[in-house]
Image: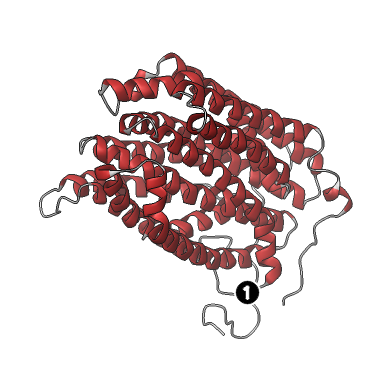
Amino acid sequence: MSALSRQEGPAAPVPAYKVPSGVLDGPVAPTMLRLAVPTTLVLVVQTLVGVAETYFVGFLGTDALAGVALVFPVLMLMQMMANGGIGGGVSSAVARALGAKRHDDAEALIWHAVVMAGAFGILFTAAALLAAPILYRAMGGTGPALAAALTYSGVVFAGSIPIWVTALLSSALRGAGNVRVPALVISSGTVLLLALSPALIFGWGPVPRLGVAGGGVAVVAYYLFAALALTLYLRSSRSLVKLRVVPLRARLFKDILGVGFLSAIGTVQVNLTVTLVTAAVGRFGADAIAGYGIASRLDYIQIPLIFGLGTAMVTMVGHNIGAGQLARARRVAWIGAALAFGMTEAIGLAAAIFPQAWIGLFSDDPQVLAMGTLYLRIVAPAYGAVGLGLALYFASQGAKRVLFPVLAGTVRMIIAAFIGWAAVIWFGAGLSTLFQITALAAVSYGLLTTAAMMGGAWGRHHASHPLPRRRPAE
């Protein structure tokens, strides 16, 4: 038995866990925003730091910029799978356990999450090393752009395990209603990343010039710092839920994967969509890839906004489902969806009206500007539909009901990726047609997710089959 899990004498008393105020009763919107704002603000800062890294890489030339653009959808696949996929399963499981007053299970779930982080991290490192050359070539990478992509990818994916550990430990804390500590860790890490990235890319004093690889080294250093900080906090007396080594239990893995597996499929669909659209854009040359890569980064600005709101929704819905309050859980879902739609649609309209305000931050090449502007004017007005669908997806994670949102994502992928890709490859469609198909896919996703929710996608399972309360020790 591990020394971390062994206890001498009488069992230590379980620390009192208090459900965050407003989660189970009272006004929904103020509580949701209180839980969402720290995560949202810090993740926006983190995303802007990623944008700053793209800015620094831009000084290395169009080939370096195109190389990073090729890697970006794959890196986002892993980060979204870790945070919104399996991480969503961790948050949901912890929230439902605490809502049902199963504190021991909630703590045990954290160790199970660490084990899963190690397994998924190894899987992604191996996959990146083996498949990267084939994948980036298929996405249109050639010559110096492909070389830059392989260099950046090799460094970043070597740090897959700390990326996964950071994501799943943060998810566990958010599921318990603790949004402050993950926010503080991410804030501190972004300062580190912002300092390291230009120093390693361009060289600074004794630091050698690493070029595009330097950006990858900075990302890995950030996640190593974050994983260590979160681990130390969860082992400390300050945390009301603790990271401790426990015997592995199939039912706890099942509780995480019951949400996380389907959610991970959903994130694969999102990023496969981006990857195939990128491959189709690649048929139009490096300038098109660079312009699309810059413009589509604005798509991902939505992710911190919706993720911050969505993690609050997972916590609130999960606690209410665990406590048997289905009606309040539904109300949380609809209020969160309305807020998400408003935020993302405002961003989309601004981007469509003033596209060069964004594209011009990264390049002054006329062709790159033209390609990016075309994308934003066509696709950005559909951002609200994506925000609406993603918010209902997060709410469904909390309710352990993610099948219908994932199926809506399947429809989006079929329209944007396969029909869009086929239109370019087989029928000679131009970029304008490809981007119109992408916008149609986004609108379809929002409408189908909303229709599924209104049609009773959560069913009556929770009312007739309440979750078990505290289980005896196994």
The number of numbered discs placed on residues in the rendered structure image is 1
Q: Going 13% across and 48% down the picture, which residue do you hit?
A: 204
**Which residue is found at the position 61% from the left and 65% from the top?**
107
Residue 342 in sight in this render? yes
Q: Which residue lies furthest to the right in this view?
A: 464
Quadrant location of the C terminus? bottom right
Q: Name the spot of residue 96 as percent of width and height, x first.
A: 71, 54
Q: Name the residue under label 1.
A: 248
Q: Helix, strand, or loop for circle 1?
A: loop
- What sort of colour scheme is used for the picture? secondary structure
Where's residue 61, x and y in %? 21, 36
Residue at (25%, 24%) from the top-left corner?
365
Q: Which amino acid does label 1 sit on?
A: Leu
Q: Vertical placement of 291 versus 146: above or below?
A: above
Which percent across, then down, holds residue 346? Answer: 52, 20
Say above or below: 164 vs 373.
below
The answer to which image quadrant residue 242 occupies is: bottom right
How packed mark 1 is, by other alpha carbons closer than 10 Å (few <14, some 14-19, many 20 or more), is: few
